[in-house]
Each structure stands twice: as C-alpha cells, then as structure tokens.
Amino acid sequence: MRNFSIVWICSDQQRWDTLQCLGFKGTQTPNIDRLAARGTAFARAYCQSPICTPSRTSFLTGLYPIAHQVHQNGAGTFPSHLVLLPKLMANAGYYTGHIGKLHLSATRGMIEKRPDDGFAEFYWSPEPFPEWSGNHDYHAWMWSKGVNPEAYFKPYLDQHYGPGPAAEYRQARWAGDRAERFIKMHSDRSWYLGVNIDAPHPPLNPPPDYLRRFNPNDMPDPAFKPIDLEHQKKFERVDQQAKFAVDPWHAATDAGEAHNDELAGPTHEAPPTKFNIWEMRAAYHAEVAQVDDLVGRIIDTLTETGQLDRTIIVFMSDHGDMMGDHGLLYKGCRFYEGVVHVPLVISVPGSPAQGSVSNALVELVDIAPTLLSLSGLEVPKAMQGLSLDQMLLGNTSLDCHKPYVVSEYHNSLRFRGSRGSRASMYYDGRHKLNVYHDVGIGELFDHKEDPNEHYDVWDSHHHRGLKYDLLGRSFSAMMLRSGSGPERIEDY
C-alpha cells in the first residue's frame, strides 16, 4: 500500500462552469483554484446520471447505472451485493470516515438506511433542513452550540433564493469542524475521508455576507435563445399512446417565469414559479463560495498537520443545475451541459501533472478505480470505470482517456402523474445524442458548430446518416456497460 491518505470532497448540484481557474466569470473559487494548482483540473468530466442517487452509486461503486440498477431517488434499500469504495479501502486497512450526505437510498423525512459502507466514523447530514428527528449530526452540532435547527431555518423554508441564515452555523461550517477533527485525530495513519456538502443544491439561501460578494449584474447570461422555448415543446408533443412520457420539467417561459411544477415534495424542493435568473445565479455562486471555503479549510488543516504532501484530494460534484439554460431550472430528464457536465479536480502528491488542465473525456465512474490504483490496491474486475492514475502520474497524455461518455435517466425522480421516463446520452466529444426511449424522440447536437446546444439536428435530413451511426454506437455502449456478471473461470 502506498502511504497516501485520501479526502474526497463532493458538492451537490454544482455546474462545471463554476471554477475560476478554468476561466469562468461570475464565480469566486480561490481555494478550489489552489487545489487545481497542486493537481489536475478535468475540463470535460461527466456524471453518469443527472440525478443524485444513481450518480452517487456510480462513482462510489465504479459501475454504470445500467449495471448497478440503482436508478431512483427515494429507493427503500440499497442492494447488498454492491461493494462501495470506502468498504474496499477499509478492507485494505485504511481508517475511514464520512461527513454529510450519502443518499444511496431514501432520505426524505427519514433516516437513511446505511448499506455496508465500511465507514468507521459516520457523521450523517442529508441536507441542512429540519425534516428528521435524531441521527442528524449537523443538527446535533447546532444544538451543542445552543442553536435550534427548526427555528434557525424556518424563516427560509419557502424562500427559493435570496439571503439566508448567517454563516456561523451553516452546514459548511459543521462539515469543516468534523473534517478538521478527523484529520487531526488520525494524522498517524492512512485514512480515507468522504466529505459531502449539500451546497449549492437549491434552495439558494447563502449567508448575507456571501451573497453581497456577487452582483447579479455581473452574472453570465444563461445559454438561452427564444428557439429553446419552442424546442422544449417537443417534449410535450409525444405520442399520447406511449407507455412512457418524458417527465415534466420546470420550464421557463422566459428568464423569469416557470411552469410544470410537478415535483413531489416540500416547497423548497421545487423551483420558483417566478424568478430573476441573474439574482438566482448570484445566490448560486454565493453557495459555491461556501463550498470553496470548506475546501480551503481542509487544505489548511492538512498543511498544519503536515499531511498535505501525503494526501490525495478529490473535488467534484454529483451533477449540475440548469440555472436558466434553455429556459430550464434545476435537474431532470435531460442531458444538457449544465446538468451532466461537472467539475473535477484531483491532486496527487508529487505528480508532474500538478497545475495542469486535462481536456480528455472522463467520467465520475472513473474515480473509484483511480483511487484504488493510486493506493496500490487491486481494482475489482467487475468495476467498470477506467483509472486516471497514469494521467495523474504523468505517464500518459492529459488529452486522451476514452472515446465517449454516457449518462442515463430511468424513472429517477418522482413526478405526480408520471409513469416514469427512460433516456440515455452518448457523447463523443463533438456530437451528443440524447435518446428519450419509448416516446420516439431524441436530440442531436454538434458541439463544434453549436457548443451551447441550441440547435437540435435530430430531425435534420442532412444529419440522418450521422444520427443512425450514433444510435448504433449508443446502443453498443449501453450493451457493453450492462455488466458481464460473475467472473468466468471455465469454458462451461
């Protein structure tokens, strides 16, 4: 075993274009940029599902959704046969800890049923809001400081975006406290720590002092053209006899009004029906700033304890957020860049690739085998991700990893009146094919000519040959990722 410790930081619903070090305007991420200066920033990283639970299952197991079959948020259990990365690390002798959100099964109004996750220390906080009684470590931390969680958040439960509670008792501060204690207590051994913060997941209620740093007038415009509104009607005109329809989305009629508010759950889980997208984006980037401060605090603690030069650090997010792109908000059954393209930064001590940017196509499913390989551990044959270790160690090109990436949606969110959507994405770095199964529709975008995905050429006669070729490639890719089952040991 190599003498590395590992800290894996995962934000929730953070877009790829939120890192200042990659040249994006409107955001402020000095600490994530500091991490990127010590590591490699992956400019084209994609999640395996635009929804929390299937995405998190993929990056913690190294399996694609079609193989692990954990497709839905709100599932009652987590399959016992699936092996999580922290369990493998614990089996290899690492001391393991978890802080924050796990979300591998249902959490709404209940305590999540823990799988065989391998964590020696487990500090659970699915989201900041007081919908649980007991076993919510963030709330216990608040009570220890004399703060009532219900009273603290009550004024903001129906506020979709805008100034929220002060920073002193926010979930990011709690996560920083827990991470600092863990890192200091276990400096004499190799450890693995997962830190999962809820921000910038809506509602977007950053502390007032954070929100003041972001002027709505300085926010970049969403990727939006009037043609997008007409395009979204494509999903409303599906065959009424189809067994499945495309799940309703929170679509905006312009930059300030939304409809199709069909998401089941508390008010703060559904997007606003009226909004100012630039004010919303300012609040979103203020939430990202809280995540950035958490990253900085972890780096500082590692530095103070002399562990920075022997700790692998991963920063990423489970999926993105549309934030007004194409007239849409939040997440759902689509595969636009805003929701499937995610930030990913990995720092490996002593790597010659420090301070580099990779333009290779990579996937979150690649992280688990990467960490195993960097730790000198065997990657299970059933694990489907492709390790990034040789890129990170400077042994292979930073611009070539795999020829395509995929993402899936299979009845992943519960909508009132919906029978559930099934859809898949195949992206080769230029052409993105999105197939909405069972309803006879799809999308095809050419990123060279149309990087913001405004002009769908699915129905273009000129692109018919390309579409059929990509459909074949997409089908082949999904069949390849469906899994081969137990390892073969004989001819029959």
Image (spheres, rainbow, N blue to C red):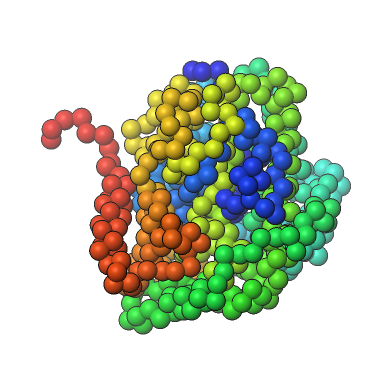
Q: On screen, 473 above or below 33?
A: below
Q: Where is residue 256 in the image (x, y as percent from the top left)?
A: 66, 75
221 lies left or right of 379: right
391 lies left or right of 206: left
Q: Position of residue 89 (x, y in %)?
A: 50, 28
Q: Where is residue 24 in the image (x, y as percent from the top left)?
A: 63, 50
369 lies left or right of 319: left
Give 487 or 360, whichever is nearer the viewer: 360
Q: In which quarter of the image is residue 268?
A: bottom right
Residue at the limit of the structure toward the front, as seen here: 449
Give 239 or 453, whichever is nearer the viewer: 453
Q: On screen, 388 above or below 245?
A: above
Q: How many discs appear?
A: 0
Give 141 or 37, whichever is nearer the viewer: 37
Residue 421 in sight from this viewpoint: yes
481 lies left or right of 233: left
Q: Where is residue 33 in the image (x, y as percent from the top left)?
A: 66, 39
Image quarter where the C terminus lies is top left
Residue at the limit of the structure toward the right, as seen here: 146
At 73% from the left and 69% from the top, the residue drawn is: 158
At 73% from the left and 60% from the top, the residue drawn is: 218
At 46% from the left and 71% from the top, the residue drawn is: 247
At 48% from the left and 42% from the top, the residue drawn is: 359
Q: On screen, 219 above or below 362?
A: below
Residue 78 in sight from this viewpoint: no
Residue at the limit of the structure toward the left, as seen here: 492
